[in-house]
Image (cartoon, helix red, strand yellow):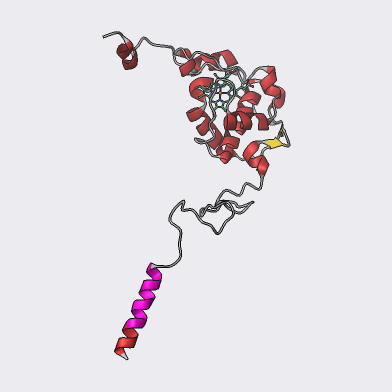
Amino acid sequence: MLFTAFVALAGCRQDMHDQPRFKPFARSDFYTDLRSARPPVEGTVARGQLREDSYLYTGKLGNDPGDYLPFPVTEELLARGQQRYDIYCAPCHSRVGDGNGVIVARGFPRKPPSYHIERLRQAPLGYFFDVITNGYGSMTDYATQIAPRDRWAIVAYIRALQLSQAATSADVPAGQKVPSDPPQFEELGSGATPPVVETKPARHSAQEEPK
Ligand code: HEC
């Protein structure tokens, strides 16, 4: 009895050892393409990758950029947008979006356009989302650094920047005080970009010198 139990259990263990399996990338005659590693079934969606709302991830309706946010704009969203903008975009575009960020002031070879030019003031919101997602000209994309929701938050904040720089007293809701002497855009712009100061030569330029 004990012997039988022993044999039976040993058998189980052996089964687990020898269970059918393929070594990685082994050939298999079972499939017509001879590959044991099977491609995922068509339409398979990886966990967390179901991008059903394509507008949220592309900013496009068909091939054209849409002009709305995929969720409501709240004060929190704008605050988040401002914070992300100041981290990721302001170094080049400046805090007010005139394109005179510190990197540009220190010699970045290409100056970004101001967000306050007519073309970009008219550009739909989805266009800005697309520029962040895919880059534009000499500007790299920020798809890996900035999650889609944060990209939209930045977009909302850029639109707020644009509106703020072109606002008139007529835009102030009735009953609210209009600042008697609102600061001018130029003043804000130059104040936002610290002056270039002479610094010691960067280390890499020293290394480039012939030894
Ligand atoms: C390292 C510098 C740099 C950073 C950081 C940067 N940009 Fe740019 N951006 C540029 C340059 C340079 C251009 C102009 C590119 C060209 O015309 O080839 C540009 C152009 C743009 C344009 C205008 C596209 C057009 O139609 O003319 C938008 C919009 C824009 N950037 C948004 C952003 C946003 C939003 C961020 C932050 C997520 C950002 N950029 C971060 C350098 C930068």
Q: Quarter holding the N terminus? A: bottom left
Q: Quadrant of residue 55?
A: top right
Give the total number of marks visible in the rendering: 0
Of residues 30 and 155, the one drawn nearer to the viewer in this rendering? 30
Judge left or right: residue 139 versus residue 171: left
Dominant secondary structure, magenta = helix
Tell me, yes or no, whether the highlighted magenta stretch contains residue 191. no
Task: Tell me residue 38's x, y (percent).
Answer: 54, 53
- Please provide the residue range marked out in magenta: 7-17
Of residues 88 and 49, the one drawn nearer to the viewer in this rendering? 49
On screen, 82 above or below 115? below
Residue at image coords 69%, 18%: 118
On screen, 175 above or below 27? above
Residue at image coords 70%, 29%: 124
- Mark yes or no: residue 184 visible: no
Tell me, yes or no, whether the highlighted magenta stretch contains residue 16. yes
Q: Quadrant of residue 149?
A: top right
User: Please, which residue is most extreme toward the left here?
Assistant: 211
Task: Tell me residue 21's x, y (percent).
Answer: 45, 62
User: Please, which residue is most extreme toward the bottom here?
Assistant: 1
Task: Tell me residue 128's x, y (percent).
Answer: 63, 29
Q: Quadrant of residue 182?
A: top right
Judge left or right: residue 198 versus residue 116: left
User: Please, which residue is most extreme toward the front here?
Assistant: 29
Ligand 1 location (quadrant): top right
Of residues 181 and 95, the one drawn nearer to the viewer in this rendering? 95
- Mark yes or no: residue 109 visible: yes
Task: Tell me residue 129's x, y (percent).
Answer: 62, 32
